[in-house]
């Protein structure tokens, strides 16, 4: 915890340093002047924190003697690697390629850290290979530009205890209204239907995403911050109601206490992303075989909308001398069956391409889920994620502010909506402090 | 506090205050040992039992199994990290202590213009936290192309302003001028005098500096985080932190982080047990004069 705080503090510190000295910076325009192949052999560096990425890159290196990629690693993005990227951009020794989550791309974009791959014909031609909304996440709303190649996605669905729902004669909820009814029935047995997370603001954002909201927008020059749009209000009020009526528990997530709630059948569902499948399997080993996955509850019966939680991309940094080769590698890494299969086996990476969703490894039944081919549910969810949700340039700050408010709200101090309202004004202040134009 | 101090007063001690002192010490001992006990217990459990057995008592004893898995994970990268930590901390502390000793000794025993100024600047260095220097160091090392190398972590580890401060105070009080005069009269050069006479007299202080520096480098996390990209160069702190940052998505890493953290405190414990004797006399000797 302490380490994390120090890292965040230093991150803030050096962000100030960065923006303070940007006049001397080497970060010029971000547009790729050209995207032409280089003569001879090219060496690229690529920073990623995916365990096992080295083996995948080895395959590429064997097949492409003229484009050799060297892997660099570190902790996951928000735990230090993003700050390292900013430091390296400042020092002029950033790697050619780097892994960046969707919610962090705008931050790099406003600091002119990303190369626009719009000039790379191969990349633009691959647009239709990717699930539509993931392309929206990397093009940042610009039509002729793209700032990264989508890597993975986290479409959301509902994990639930099939055995307990059946034993207690409770119908599997298909709408959020039914979900609340089910929550009451579950509560009557002494358990909770789920746990509301105070810390995972990107999960909450996934709920807002499903409800059709969007927290940010950029019209080409100015940012709009909208943490309290009607969809966000609806979602906040809904969960506030469940908290007030004591229908959901509010233990801190990713703790032993939280694992235990699932392992001991004290919590019955989890509305989470595709990668959550492994979190349950390892956190609640005693419940193996008893889980199943269903489409996320909808706001209106008959709707089909899904949210997304997580997902990252492979970006080319400003200053790379070989955007052509770099983007070629990024495309191979994120579209070839070979690479996607390896990434899925070694690190549960769920592809962002339409083809990738049909990989043989994603068609198999999963024992922990009673043999259900759960990835079919997520493949469908992936096609139902809206293209409209956009992230802002200061997400770490936004997450922290909203999370502080959520923590207060679950202990009875204010409401979730209050937290969003505060997060809204704090975010606007943060943008102004960094001289990022914002509309109020 | 008063209870602890009063135990030093000798035979007229009342039983009550002695018991009070014991209780206070017991509470503090527990406070410091329980996390380590927890870590030890956690590393002996299989990942399935980690969540659903008593946190402070054994379930099935899987420690060696767990260590085996940790060491085998990704071709033994963990062992590489431990070795790196030992290199950074061991070599860094050894050389750092030597430099600090030379510097402190020179400041204490030689008169030259600017002596106080230098000492005050070094003292100022004690006040600057290492974390604050990491980013400037990164930018400097970037200019000379030394980031992401062994030297990026090793060179900054050689500097110990606190060590200079301590050795200066200690040299002033424990190395008598008369002895140096005698050795000079006998024809020994300054360097020989330093290594054969002064270093021996200053030994307790040097052990203290070594221990401080060893622990500081071993625990220094922020500098490697900023400097290093190549997994093969990571010290164990940064390696475990990287794993821990991915526990949400790769849950099996949790076990490796726990077992790895437990193993990583063992070298520190050994160093302390071996050098503790010197350290105590070192702190005491400095305080008497």
Image (cartoon, grey):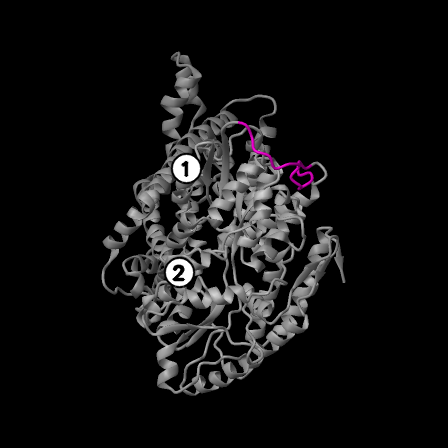
The answer to whether residue B177 is visible is yes
Q: Chain of mark 1?
A: A
**Callout 1: SS:** helix
Where, quadrant-wise, is the C terminus of chain A in this rendering?
Answer: bottom right
**Residue at 61%, 44% in the rendered image:** A117
**Residue at 29%, 47% in the rendered image:** B71
Count of numbered tags: 2
> Is the stretch drawn in magenta largely helix, strand or loop?
loop
Residue that sits furthest to the right in the current view: A440
Label 2 vs 1, first from the N-terminus: 1
- Stretch of the chain drawn in magenta: A25-39
Residue at which label 2 appears: A362
Which x, y percent locates residue A210?
57, 70
Which x, y percent locates residue B9?
38, 55
- Determine the image quadrant of residue B138: top right
Left/right of residue A33 with respect to residue A75 in the rendered view: right
Q: Determine which of the numbered discs, if any, sits on residue A63 in the image.
A: 1
- Determine the image quadrant of residue B203: top left
């Amino acid at each position: 915890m302490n380490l994390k705080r120090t890292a965040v503090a230093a991150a803030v510190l050096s962000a100030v340093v960065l923006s303070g000295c940007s006049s001397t910076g080497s970060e010029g325009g971000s547009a790729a002047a050209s995207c032409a192949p280089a003569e001879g052999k090219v060496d690229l560096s690529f920073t990623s924190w995916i365990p096992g990425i080295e083996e995948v890159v080895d395959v590429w290196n064997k097949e492409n003697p003229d484009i050799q990629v060297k892997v660099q690693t570190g902790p996951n993005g928000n735990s230090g690697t993003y700050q390292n990227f900013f430091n390296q951009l400042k020092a002029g020794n950033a790697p050619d390629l780097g892994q960046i989550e969707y919610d962090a791309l705008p931050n790099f974009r406003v600091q002119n850290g990303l190369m626009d791959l719009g000039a790379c014909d191969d990349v633009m031609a691959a647009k239709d290979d990717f699930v539509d909304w993931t392309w929206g996440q990397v093009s940042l709303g610009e039509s002729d530009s793209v700032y990264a190649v989508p890597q993975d996605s986290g479409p959301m669905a509902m994990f639930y205890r099939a055995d307990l729902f059946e034993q207690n004669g409770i119908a599997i909820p298909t709408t959020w209204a039914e979900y609340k009814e089910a929550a009451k029935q579950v509560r009557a047995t002494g358990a909770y239907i789920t746990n509301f997370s105070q810390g995972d603001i990107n999960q909450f954002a996934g709920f807002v995403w499903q409800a059709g909201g969007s927290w940010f927008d950029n019209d080409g020059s100015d940012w709009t911050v909208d943490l309290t749009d009607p969809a966000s209000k609806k979602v906040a009020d809904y969960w506030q109601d469940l908290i007030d009526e004591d229908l959901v528990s509010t233990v801190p997530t990713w703790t032993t206490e939280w694992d235990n709630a699932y392992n001991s059948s004290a919590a019955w569902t989890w509305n989470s992303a595709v990668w959550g499948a492994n979190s349950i399997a390892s956190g609640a080993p005693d419940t193996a075989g008893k889980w199943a996955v269903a489409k996320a509850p909808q706001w209106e019966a008959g709707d089909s909308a899904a949210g997304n939680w997580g997902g990252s991309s492979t970006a080319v940094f400003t200053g790379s001398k070989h955007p052509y080769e770099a983007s070629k590698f990024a495309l191979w890494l994120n579209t070839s069956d070979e690479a996607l299969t390896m990434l899925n086996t070694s690190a549960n990476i769920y592809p962002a391409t339409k083809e990738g969703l049909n990989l043989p490894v994603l068609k198999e039944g999963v024992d922990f889920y009673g043999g259900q081919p759960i990835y079919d549910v997520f493949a469908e969810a992936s096609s139902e994620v809206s293209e409209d949700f956009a992230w802002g340039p200061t997400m770490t700050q936004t997450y922290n502010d909203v999370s502080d408010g959520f923590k207060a709200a679950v202990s009875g101090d204010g409401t979730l909506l209050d937290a969003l309202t505060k997060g809204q004004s704090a975010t606007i202040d943060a943008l102004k402090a960094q001289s990022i134009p914002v509309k109020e | 506090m008063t209870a602890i101090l009063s135990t030093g007063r000798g035979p007229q001690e009342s039983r009550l205050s002695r018991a009070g002192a014991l209780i206070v010490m017991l509470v503090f001992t527990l406070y410091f040992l329980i996390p380590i006990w927890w870590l030890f217990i956690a590393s002996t459990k299989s990942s399935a039992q980690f969540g659903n057995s008593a946190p402070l008592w054994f379930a099935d004893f899987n420690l060696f199994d767990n260590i085996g898995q940790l060491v085998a994970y990704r071709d033994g990268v963990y062992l590489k990290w431990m070795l790196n930590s030992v290199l950074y901390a061991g070599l860094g502390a050894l050389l750092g202590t030597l430099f600090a000793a030379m510097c402190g000794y020179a400041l204490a025993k030689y008169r030259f213009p600017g002596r106080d100024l230098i000492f005050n600047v070094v003292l100022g260095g004690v006040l600057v936290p290492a974390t604050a220097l990491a980013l400037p160091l990164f930018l400097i090392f970037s200019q000379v192309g030394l980031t992401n190398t062994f030297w990026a972590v090793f060179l900054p580890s050689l500097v110990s302003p606190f060590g200079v401060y301590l050795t200066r105070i200690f040299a002033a009080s424990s190395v008598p001028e008369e002895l140096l005069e005698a050795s000079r009269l006998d024809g020994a050069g300054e360097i020989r005098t330093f290594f054969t006479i002064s270093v021996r007299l200053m030994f307790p202080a040097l052990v203290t500096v070594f221990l401080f520096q060893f622990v500081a480098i071993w625990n220094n996390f922020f500098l490697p985080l900023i400097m290093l990209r190549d997994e093969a160069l990571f010290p164990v702190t940064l390696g475990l932190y990287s794993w821990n940052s991915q526990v949400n998505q790769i849950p099996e890493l949790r076990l490796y982080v726990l077992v790895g953290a437990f193993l990583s405190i063992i070298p520190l414990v050994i160093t302390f047990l071996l050098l503790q004797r010197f350290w105590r006399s070192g702190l005491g000797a400095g305080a008497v004069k």
